[in-house]
Amino acid sequence: MITIKKGKAPKELLQYGRQDLSSYAGMPSDVKKKVIESLLSEQGHLCAYCMSRIDGGEGKHRATIEHWLPQAASAEKERLDYKNMLAVCWGNRDAHSNNDKSCDAKRGSLSGEQQNMKKLNVFDGRTMAGIRYGADGTIFSDDPDLDEDLNKRLNLNCEARRLKECRLQSLRALHREINEKYPNATAPKKYFRELLDHYTEPGEKRMPYSGIIIAWLSKRV
């Protein structure tokens, strides 16, 4: 998971929001499509929570709009506020068990105030700095409130989605890249810095599950 920097709202959303009786539930499909395209662009086509690859098409990899402040706890104006919107993955939302869901699908299965984050804020790097990764790819935090957000509300170690394994595979791929470049020597700190700059640079297509890579590289620069 990485900090998300919000850009400007699409003009189509702003125009729709100025209409009488506009609502999120009544948002036209063409406006919603523009919103999703904009969200995907600023998030590098990654889910805001688990960092899996998402796109604007159909099927299991399609992106959906998530409200940072849950719709149940917000007024219509906030539901149409672009700053309150994120692009997220399918989250296995058709699973029979809520334990097999993740991201907003898991968060949405909770009732009332339980959906509200206690500490995690993907727009605020200060809270994101408390996220840790285990040797097996587990995401966690030493802060109990932040850890509750990661695991109870978002279920980011979801076994059904093999999220720990996906993160670990991403990190192992980086290790192979480093070993191929420096097979008989320790990579210099400058190289780690170049890699960190690469993985943290905003772009249209970012590496899936790169949060664990960024955390690992940050310890070496």
Image (tube, helix red, strand yellow):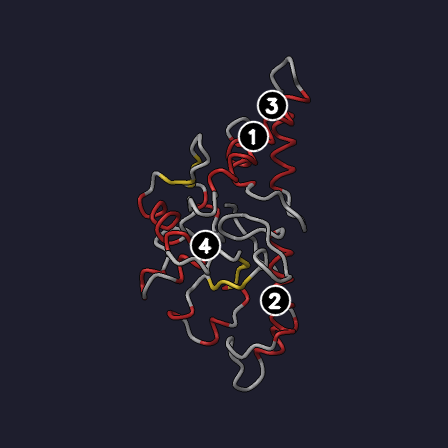
Lower sequence index among marks 4 and 3:
4
Q: In the rendered image, which residue does mark 1 sit on?
A: 172
Q: Residue at x 52, y 46 (%)?
A: 2
Q: Secondary structure at mark 3?
A: helix
Q: Residue at x 40, y 49 (%)?
A: 155
Lower sequence index among marks 1 and 3:
1
Q: Secondary structure at mark 2?
A: helix
Asked if residue 203 lies left or right of residue 116, the reply is right
Q: Position of residue 147 (x, y in %)?
A: 35, 45
Lower sequence index among marks 2 and 1:
2
Q: Position of residue 189 (x, y in %)?
A: 60, 23
Tell which of 161 and 168 is nearer to you. Answer: 161
Residue neighbourhood size for the residue with mark 2, other residues' Cα within 10 Å, grouped as few (<14), some (14–19), many (≥20): many
Q: Residue at x 53, y 32 (%)?
A: 218
Cα gap from disc 4 to disc 1, whole angstroms: 24 Å
In the image, what residue type sits under mark 4? Answer: Cys
In the image, what residue type sits under mark 2? Answer: Val
Closer to the camera: disc 1 or disc 3? 1
Q: In the rendered image, which residue does mark 3 sit on?
A: 189
Q: In the rendered image, which residue does mark 4 sit on?
A: 103
Q: In the rendered image, which residue does mark 2 sit on?
A: 35
Residue 6 sits above or below residue 205 on the image: below
Q: Quadrant of the C terminus?
A: top right
Closer to the camera: disc 4 or disc 3? 4
